[in-house]
Image (cartoon, rainbow, N blue to C red):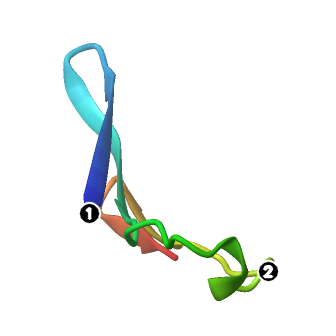
Amino acid sequence: HIVYAIAFENGRIVGALERELEAAEDDPAAQPADAEPVVTARRHGELFR
C-alpha cells in the first residue's frame, strides 16, 4: 500500500508525502517494535528522507 498526501497553499502545491505501508501481520511479534516506516517527502522540489 502506498499513501500520498499533498499540501496546498493558495491553490499551489507546497509539499507532498509518499509513504509505503506494509500489510498488517497476524502476529504482532513478527515486526520489531523499533521498525520505522519508509517516508519520502518533497517540498519545493527538494527530496527529504
Labels 2 and 1: the sequence-earlier one: 1
Say which mark, if any, is on residue 34: 2
> Vertically, is 28 above or below 11?
below
- Percent across and percent down for residue 11 are 20, 17
The image quadrant where one finds the N terminus is bottom left
Judge by depth and name the residue closer to the eye, 34 or 5: 34
Residue found at x 74% / y 85%: 32
Query: Dot 1 corresponds to which residue?
Result: 1
Q: Residues within 10 Å of mark 1 (few under 14, many from 20)?
A: few
> Vertically, is 41 above or below 29?
above
- Left or right? Give the position of 38 relative to 9: right
Residue found at x 65% / y 76%: 36
> Vertically, is 30 above or below 4?
below
- Left or right? Give the position of 38 relative to 20: right
Look at the numbered disc 1 and give the secondary structure of its residue: loop
**Residue closest to the far left:** 11
Residue found at x 34% / y 53%: 44
Look at the numbered disc 2 and give the secondary structure of its residue: loop
Residue found at x 28% / y 49%: 4
| Tag 1: amino acid | His
For residue 31, what is the image quadrant? bottom right
**Residue closest to the far right:** 33
- Percent across and percent down for residue 28 are 67, 72
Say which mark, if any, is on residue 48: none
Asked if one can make out residue 31 in the rendered structure from this viewpoint, the answer is no
- Percent across and percent down for residue 19 are 39, 62
Judge by depth and name the residue closer to the eye, 40 or 22: 22
| Tag 2: amino acid | Asp
For residue 20, what is the image quadrant? bottom left
